[in-house]
Amino acid sequence: MITGAGRNIGRAIALDLASGGMDVVVVVRRNREEAEGVAGEVRSLGRRAMVGVGDVRDEEAISGVVERAREELGPVNVLVNNAAVRREAPFLELPVAEWREVLDIILDGTFVCSRAVLPDMLDSGWGRIVNLAGLAAQTGAPQRAHVVAGKAGLIGLTKALALEFAPRGITVNAVAPGVIDTVREGPEPSHHRGVSIPVGRRGKPEDVSGMVRYLVSEEAAFVTGQTFGVNGGLYL
């Protein structure tokens, strides 16, 4: 189950995991048409796919998506929390409502989705949760206090869940992408402009999805509570 999977990094993760043999639940907030397109691509790879439409903050909606997934595809043993909003505003002009909305989607959404699928993982004695953080959570970024706070909180939540559920066969890790070429609804973040990336290029969604594919694999069974930078050396 991948949230925010209609485009960009979420879409790449869906296709990468399908290529690795997984059935996929494509979760989006509103755009069913976009999600159906990704589901169709998953099916073209020979795997089953289901579309779930719902706000990740809405417990009832997400519970409904997970219940349908159990019926159509089986237990949900892998969760990728990718849904987020990435706004910009000077801190002293940042509306309280926007602060709360960004943190709600990033943190509350991860909380709601993780709680919805953890019973399946506990029943199976095996599970993988991957949370999409970001380079800004590690470095800070101007005019993005709400996004930075939310993503940094996600790294903390990753560690807490990793420790709590490690004895039950469930790993929890975070991936922190750097500057990734994606389709955006708004302008590019100001702190991305003109940066010099050591590897000489911006990242692709597939650079991130490859890391996620490893973390949800059996090969990563001894890896938990970690944050993996996919940033071309920019953090250095």
Image (tube, rainbow, N blue to C red):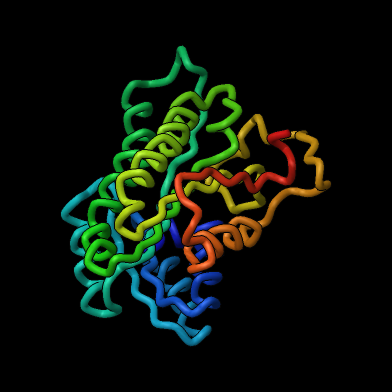
| Image point (19%, 51%), residue name | 59
Q: Is residue 50 left or right of residue 138?
A: left
* Placement of the C terminus among the 4 image quadrants: top right
| Image point (47%, 73%), residue name | 37
The answer to which quarter of the image holds residue 64 is bottom left
- Farthest residue, direction top: 92
Q: Is residue 31 visible?
A: no
Residue 116 point in image, percent of width and height: 23, 56
Residue 60 point in image, percent of width and height: 16, 54
Q: Is residue 177 above or below residue 95?
A: below
Residue 10 point in image, percent of width and height: 49, 59
The one of 34 and 197 positioned closer to us in this rendering: 197
Marks counted in the figure total 0
| Image point (43%, 44%), residue name | 84
The one of 88 and 140 positioned closer to us in this rendering: 140
The one of 108 and 32 positioned closer to us in this rendering: 108
Q: Is residue 26 left or right of residue 234?
A: left
Residue 126 point in image, percent of width and height: 34, 65
The answer to which quarter of the image holds residue 214 is bottom right
* Placement of the N terminus among the 4 image quadrants: bottom left
| Image point (79%, 49%), residue name | 201
Q: Is residue 34 left or right of residue 118?
A: right
Q: Is residue 103 visible?
A: yes
- Farthest residue, direction left: 60
